[in-house]
Image (cartoon, rainbow, N blue to C red):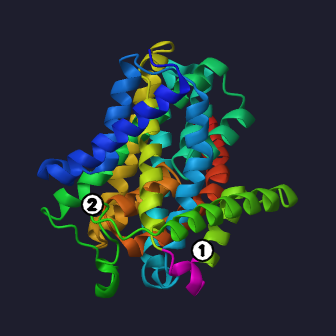
Amino acid sequence: MIADPVALAAVIAAATAVAFWLEGRYRWARNVGAALIAILLGAALSNLGLVPVGSPVYEGIFGPVTSLAIAWLLISVRLADLREAGPTMLAAFLIGVAGTAIGALVGATVLAGAFGDEAWKLAGVTTGTYSGGSLNFVAVGRELGLPPSLFAAATAADNIVTAIWFGATLLLPLWLSRGREKVDEVPARTASSLPSIHDAPVLRVLDVTALFALGFTLIWASGRLSAAVPAVPSVLWLTTLALAAGQISAVRRLSGAMLLGTVALHLFFTLMGISSRVSEIASVGPQVFYLMAIVVAVHGLVLYGIGKLARLSPATLSVASQAAIGGPTTAMAMAIARRWPALILPGMAVGLLGYAVGNYLGFGIAYLTRAFLG
């Protein structure tokens, strides 16, 4: 097992590099995307026992590296995109959240015998996490008193199902559009404005160092603001500050923000795969995985089914789905991975909205399920 922090960091970086290399070299890999390949490589490392369960390296990537990715990528976002795609994205997100709630009720009812008195709690937890991400998972799970063993198993199952669904939403726009990634909401002037990660811009030392300084400054400032106003999560402050900074002409002239953010984000993808350990589910049985899978499956059927009837583009549906299932980070990641620049900010916006509505929905569905199951 690779436990040394330096060696472990090298392995994670190498797996990420392999994902980029495959995407740039092979057609099938370009269709799959570097994000999904990184997740699969990370999962292989984890489930083969080649990397440890926990490490300070993971904390660094989950923390500062991912925060830097958010800051750098949001610096490149234009606020005009929110006006152009926001209403459609919001509608898709609300449809997806409704699908999540229905799926939680269905899953808890079908598997009530396997979980007994804990079924209604799991319904609430899955509703929370698949309406806005892991932040809601922890909040709802702790408040409802989910047993520690079930909490750990549900966390592992959540990671695996989220990773699988991320891969599915990467591929669904290709299949539903017959190989053409149609994004109705993206105007022509922004449809190709996101450069390919394989066509790197000219990087200047001054720009790169300035971006690092700016990124860390934004993270520090968001942390201080969150401490002063605890009711507002630090990611909301970071998002606001990064978006504001990105509208300053001097900041927009700095080259490399998108490239640096993309690299940092894909390191997060590799770690997302490493967090997907099948063995942790086995301790309480596969039923918890089945429950998570049912919720996400119903979510997908409702979202893509109603979305197709409403003639929403598969791109919008996929980003909205990730905003609900994984939260704002994976929503942004979906837009970045598939080069949909006009969907970055709307996806982030509804993902952050999920932080607010996820807890309310989680508790509401939990108590509704308890009443329904008696």
User: Is residue 239 depicted above or below 334 in this figure?
Assistant: below
Q: Is residue 179 magenta?
A: no
Quarter holding the N terminus is top left
- Looking at the rendering, which quadrant does residue 285 occupy? top left
Q: Nearer the viewer, residue 160 or 317?
A: 160
Confirm or deny contact between disc 2 and disc 1 (CB under 8 A): no
Whether residue 222 is visible:
yes
Q: Is residue 35 above or below residue 240?
A: above
The amino acid type of the residue labelled 1 equals Leu
| Real-space Cα separation, disc 2 to disc 1, in angstroms | 25 Å
Mark 2, residues whose alpha carbon is within 10 Å: few (<14), some, or many (≥20)? few
Q: Secondary structure at mark 2?
A: loop
Q: Where is residue 158 drawn, in percent x and y? A: 48, 35
Residue at 56% from the left image edge and 33% from the top image edge: 57
Q: Which residue is mark 1?
A: 243
Residue that carries the numbered disc 2 in the rendered image: 198
Q: Point out residue 56 in the picture as x, y percentages from the top left corner.
A: 61, 30
Q: Is residue 252 magenta?
A: yes
Q: Nearer the viewer, residue 331 or 320?
A: 331
The numbered mark, 2 or 1, whose residue comes first in the sequence reads 2
SS of the residue under disc 1: helix
Q: Position of residue 292 (x, y in %)?
A: 45, 35
**Which portion, as a residue range, is magenta?**
246-254
Q: Position of residue 213 (x, y in %)?
A: 64, 63
Q: Amino acid at mark 2?
A: His
Q: In this rendered view, identify the residue nearer to me: 354 or 19.
A: 19
